[in-house]
Image (cartoon, rainbow, N blue to C red):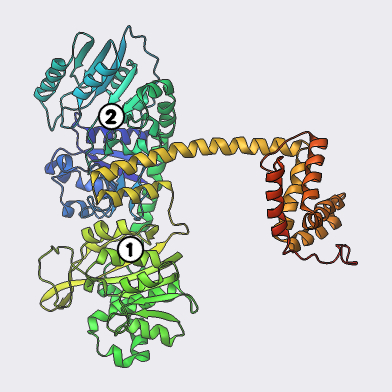
Amino acid sequence: MKIAFITNPSVQCGVSQYGLSIIAALQDFSRNTVISYPLAGKQDFEAAREDIAAADLAVYNYHPNTLGFLSKADIRSTGKPAVGLLHEFDYVTAYTELADLFRYRIVSDPSLASRLPGLWSVPRIVPQIPVAAPANDIFTIGTFGFATQGKNYDEIIRFAARHFQKARIRLHIPNSFYCDKDGKYARQMVDDCRKLADDRIEIEFSGEYLSEEALVRFLAANDLNMFLYDDQPGRGISSVLDFAVAAERPLALSQSTMFRHVRAVAPELFLDISPLERILAEGTASCQRLKALWTPKNAANALDGIFEAVLADFARPRTHRVNTVLTDDLRVALQPREEEMKQLCPTIFIRKIPRANVQQAFVLEQVERHAQPGDAVLCVGYNDDTAYYTLQEKGYTIDAIDPEFNTDLDGFFKQYHGKRYYDCIFSTSAIEHVADDETFISQIAQLLAPGGIAILTMDFQEKYQDGAAIPAADKRLYSTARILGKFVPELHGCRLLDVPDWNEYEPDFDHDGCRYHFATLVFRKNAEVYDNAAEKYEYQMCLMSKTDKWRLKKLDYEYSQTTAKLVLLHQELDMLHRENARIVNSLSWRVTKPIRFMILCLQNPHDAARKLKEKIKTIPGAHRLRKPYRYLQLLRKDPHDFCSRVKRKLAWRFAIRRPDILPATKKREGREIAAILKNRASGISFGKRLSGGKDED
């Protein structure tokens, strides 16, 4: 496979630097041929257009500041699948970022668990450069980055003054091609830092642009690397940590969203969770673990898999797509379904607008493909829905709701959520009529059973903006940005069936003075509620980001605390397993086994008798278990004698005391326990002897 990689040739830029890292990883480890095309302007693209079109696939290292001169028409003109690399995004905006330009997109955030086909996350690329431990005469803290707002270099000075009697701060702030070409802002930031420092704090400053290896060496020469960025919602992943991890030195971070990919796997590096003493004691272990995880080889392997998936999806026939726009080619493909509806529901079919019948035909096709008669099916908005009535004629049992006849989805959800789940839910052109469409989508997703599928159609216009003209019966039209930005974050536990291509076609339907067309949305509920821990975290982050910043920080802290508790819990479970193995290998199981069987006799004597019969038949020596059964009879007749015998036997044979098992030694407490045991045993009726003979005495 031949891959064309398009990037901006500017060196002093984080986006271009990341592109160079990907190119190097692909050239070293990819099984495909990768050719780089540095484009500084539109004329460079025109010169390289034919070569790019000759490749199997094109990857665009896209940012508005670097490749903003390329339009959608330019990208489509090559005729080959185009993949965009995203740089500025968060858990909320990742679904919509550059969706108007690229059908296929890659995000460099390994903590993002995408529920959208066509959007992939890849590991970070950490330079695999060998480093050595430093030998500094005083404690040295290092940091680096461009001179942009929110880096908080001055906070590092204040932090060092609070925690150290004497320290050296090394600031490396190179000039940036886009924001600080002459280094003016960098020098101003350093001057501000020097004003804060006293005799105890020594400041070193450098501004030259270092190579990748030289930058890692700079960071490896520090006793601690620190980055105290502000929280910046909507920003992408900061590449400074790729080099800081490569340096394998202790690392201290602020709770910025630009470090979220590290927080998901190494929360111990964050100062709001771990004190400085713990970070220094942890040493280089966390960075070494991340460096082994985020290698160029792992990134290249992930990218190769993405490229193969892109080519396979791009080659799919138009009529085989389910998240698409219902244009004339699909009208032709679905014509047999329309004839079927016309034959089975002629009265309703004749009332519909002919060019709109493709929606019901699509729904009918998908329901029959994914559901069988006897499955739990729900129709939302069945008024004059020919697909609903056709499925009924074919033997499907369908729960149907419509505000014109019984209830709307919100009322149905409040009554039956947690009581009913459906293998298939379909809704034909109903969502554009409801007031709260985000809740509508969320409730459908929650009503789906694991593995269930939802099939929706809606009125669609890619250029629609709020306030534009719409049909009289609609509350809105839909665009790619609204579907991805409003609906996909609500599809918790669900995933679209294929890569959507809604914005690839021009409107072809006229109604009420508006020109638009019909889009489809088909998604499936995962077998589990959450894809994995990352998706659960992502969902909660999206939810909290809609409320307020304080709750978002609180959730982030709770997530990190939960992660730490899970580690401790796993350690405790390992200890418990080892203790259980020790008990099994010793003689103490002979004590616990009769007691466990005695408890079973109290709770379910018939089940205890059945199990005892089976063991006597199969296990040599299992007749010893008759003793607890006889003890149970003794418990019913004389609880005091029962307690005394158990205490004497355990104390004599095993010389142990178990306050949680044995009755209390005091007479008053013993009488209370005996009364409780007698009360529990009073309702037990004993059956025949286990041998099938006479009743027990």
Q: Say whether disc 1 or disc 2 marks the residue closer to the N-terminus.
A: 2
Q: Secondary structure at mark 1?
A: helix
Which residue has dot 2 on it? 240
Q: Secondary structure at mark 2?
A: helix
Name the kind of residue labelled 1 in the image. Ser
Quadrant in which residue 140 is drawn: top left
The residues bearing labels 1 and 2 have C-alpha atoms spaced at a distance of: 37 Å
x 77%, y 52%: residue: 639
Is residue 182 visible in the rendered image? The answer is: no
Quadrant in which residue 329 is drawn: bottom left
x 72%, y 36%: residue: 657
Which residue has dot 1 on it? 442
Where residue 337 sits in the image (x, y, percent)?
Answer: 36, 82
Where residue 123 sits in the image (x, y, percent)?
Answer: 37, 39
Residue 283, above or below 234:
above
Number of marks:
2
